[in-house]
Image (cartoon, rainbow, N blue to C red):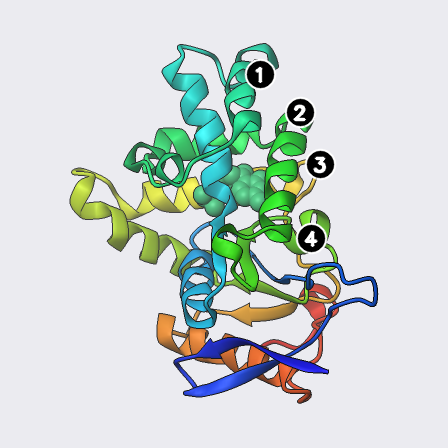
């Protein structure tokens, strides 16, 4: 049986989603779309737009790590000390509000760096993973699905996600885009500084032992270097449409060596 579970205003047509009701009458499986990729690759923009088009809930998982870092810093703690970070985790376990995730204070360079540090701690990853799993299983407002963007969604948090995208772009292009985004509110900022920050974060994210950033074997690699936001969204929507209407679409990438779109 098929149900109509998402209407794409973009395609002006109904996307047919396979009905995953099981025989025991349990609630329908919520569709999960994982969007992973390095810093400033455009994965956040893509994931947010994808969620809006499909009527799914959206979670910026980086903002959750940033919240842990910000709460630790605001409490006068050292983000390199697990005992200081633990206090922030208590707040996370009690529940994170949308207002916390939208706090502009999360968007500073200092908090980005601190987030990459706390994200290496096993206790932090566990608490954040529990929150993410709950979000994916029970999306807010009873949405029919969820789009989560991050680093390890397709590999660790939601390995059974219905669709996995790995969004990437050349480091120079990522730095250029991030610089244009930040320069007006950060007087004196240089492109070289932003490039260094991107390189450092790539290094942290890809080399850490737990949940390193990498494409899941069954991820579709979307190289954003020469695409604008609309072209990336169109490409992703085409894949979602093909998948749920029974069409073929590009096959999984088989990791970073696989075919790209
Ligand atoms: O994506 P964003 O730059 O906001 O993420 C901040 C930091 O949080 C990243 O540098 C990364 O170290 C960490 N992170 C992570 N796993 C995720 C999302 C973010 O380790 N799923």
Q: Is residue 260 above or below residue 91?
A: below
| 4 or 1: tag closer to the N-terminus | 1
Residue at the outermost right position: 23
In front: mark 3 or mark 2?
A: 2
| 4 or 3: tag closer to the N-terminus | 4
* Distance between mark 4 and mark 3 Cα atoms: 15 Å
How many residues crowd around disc 1 within 10 Å: few (fewer than 14), some, or many (20 or more)? Answer: some
Q: Give the x, y percent position of residue 243.
A: 65, 80
| 2 or 1: tag closer to the N-terminus | 1
Question: Label 3, on which residue?
Answer: 210
* Distance between mark 2 and mark 4 Cα atoms: 18 Å
Considering depth in this image, is 260 or 156 the residue closer to the camera? 156
Q: Give the x, y percent position of residue 38.
A: 52, 52
Q: Is residue 3 above or below residue 254?
A: below
Is any atom of residue 16 visible in this view? yes
Q: Are marks 4 and 3 in contact (CB under 8 Å)?
A: no
Report the side of 235 relative to 45 (left or right): right
Which of the numbered marks, if any, corresponds to residue 158? Answer: 4
- Quadrant of the rendering where the N terminus is positioned: bottom right
* Distance between mark 2 and mark 1 Cα atoms: 8 Å
Would you identify the image quadrant in which residue 203 lies?
Answer: top right
Check mark 4 vs ligand 1: CB closer than 8 Å? yes or no.
Answer: no
Which of the numbered marks, if any, corresponds to residue 86? Answer: 1
Q: Is residue 116 above or below residue 35?
A: above
Q: Give the x, y percent position of residue 105.
A: 30, 32
Considering depth in this image, is 261 or 95 the residue closer to the camera? 95
* Distance between mark 4 and mark 1 Cα atoms: 24 Å
Question: Label 2, on which residue?
Answer: 123
In front: mark 4 or mark 3?
A: 4
């Amino acid at each position: 049986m098929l149900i109509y579970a998402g209407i794409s205003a973009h395609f002006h047509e109904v996307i047919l989603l396979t009905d995953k009701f099981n025989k025991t009458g349990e609630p329908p499986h919520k569709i999960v779309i994982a969007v992973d990729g390095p810093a400033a690759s455009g994965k956040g923009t893509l994931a947010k737009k994808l969620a809006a088009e499909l009527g799914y809930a959206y979670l910026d998982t980086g903002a959750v790590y940033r919240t842990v870092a910000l709460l630790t810093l605001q409490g006068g703690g050292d983000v390199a000390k697990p005992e200081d970070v633990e206090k922030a985790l208590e707040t996370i376990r009690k529940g994170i509000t949308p207002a916390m995730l939208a706090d502009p204070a999360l968007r500073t360079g200092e908090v980005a760096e601190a987030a990459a540090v706390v994200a290496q701690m096993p206790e932090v990853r566990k608490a954040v993973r529990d929150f993410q799993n709950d979000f994916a299983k029970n999306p807010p407002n009873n949405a029919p699905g969820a789009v989560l963007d991050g680093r390890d969604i397709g590999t660790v948090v939601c390995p059974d996600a219905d669709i996995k995208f790995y969004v990437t772009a050349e480091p120079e292009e990522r730095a250029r885009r991030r610089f244009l985004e930040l320069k007006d509110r950060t007087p004196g900022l240089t492109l070289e500084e932003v490039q260094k920050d991107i390189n450092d974060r790539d290094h942290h994210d890809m080399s850490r032992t737990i949940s390193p950033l990498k494409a899941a074997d069954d991820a579709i690699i979307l190289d954003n270097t020469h695409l604008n936001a609309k072209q990336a969204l169109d490409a992703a929507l085409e894949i979602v449409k093909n998948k749920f209407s029974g069409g073929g679409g590009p096959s999984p990438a088989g990791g970073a060596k696989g075919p790209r779109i």
